[in-house]
Amino acid sequence: MDKETIVNIWRSRTFQIGMDVCRILLLMVALLILYKLITEIEAVKILSYNVCRICENKTGAICYIGNLQSIVNRTYPSYNFSGLNITIK
């Protein structure tokens, strides 16, 4: 291809319409990425405050973390069977 052919293609109306369509599509993709980035940042902020609340909202599940905290922090009695060399905690 010589330079004149390339310049003619560059100046053609079809090529310019194609470039305009590409620009519009790129703008739409950029806006979609920006929108997704903003919404995900909000989700991360919500996660840092209340993980159970976002899980409940997304899945409809019921959070039992409050009940689990009392189980985890519970102290259990210690049994010592010295004759058997076994300690159960």
Image (tube, helix red, strand yellow):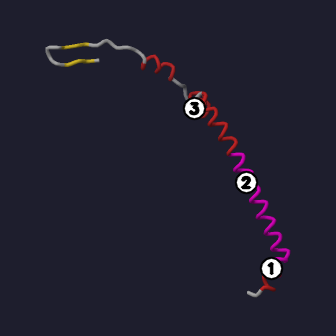
Marks 1 and 3 in Cβ contact (< 8 Å) = no
The local secondary structure at tag 2 comes to helix
Q: Residue furthest left?
A: 83
Q: Nearest the camera: 49 or 24?
A: 49
Q: Upstream in the sequence, badge 1 or badge 3?
A: 1
- Identify the magenta region: 8-36
Between tags 1 and 3, which lies in front?
A: 1
Q: Residue at x 81, y 65 (%)?
A: 20
Q: Is residue 64 above or below residue 54?
A: above
Which quarter of the figure has residue 86?
top left
The local secondary structure at tag 3 comes to helix
Residue type at mark 2? Answer: Ala
Mark 1, residue position: 9
The residues tagged by marks 3 and 2 sit, at their Cα atoms, a distance apart of 29 Å
Q: Residues within 10 Å of mark 2 (few under 14, many from 20)?
A: few
The residues tagged by marks 1 and 3 sit, at their Cα atoms, a distance apart of 55 Å
Q: Position of residue 30 (x, y in %)?
A: 73, 54
Q: Upstream in the sequence, badge 1 or badge 2?
A: 1
Between tags 3 and 2, which lies in front?
A: 2
What secondary structure predominates along the stretch shown in magenta?
helix
Q: Upstream in the sequence, badge 3 or badge 2?
A: 2
Is residue 89 covered in magenta? no
Mark 2, residue position: 30
Which quarter of the figure has residue 56?
top right
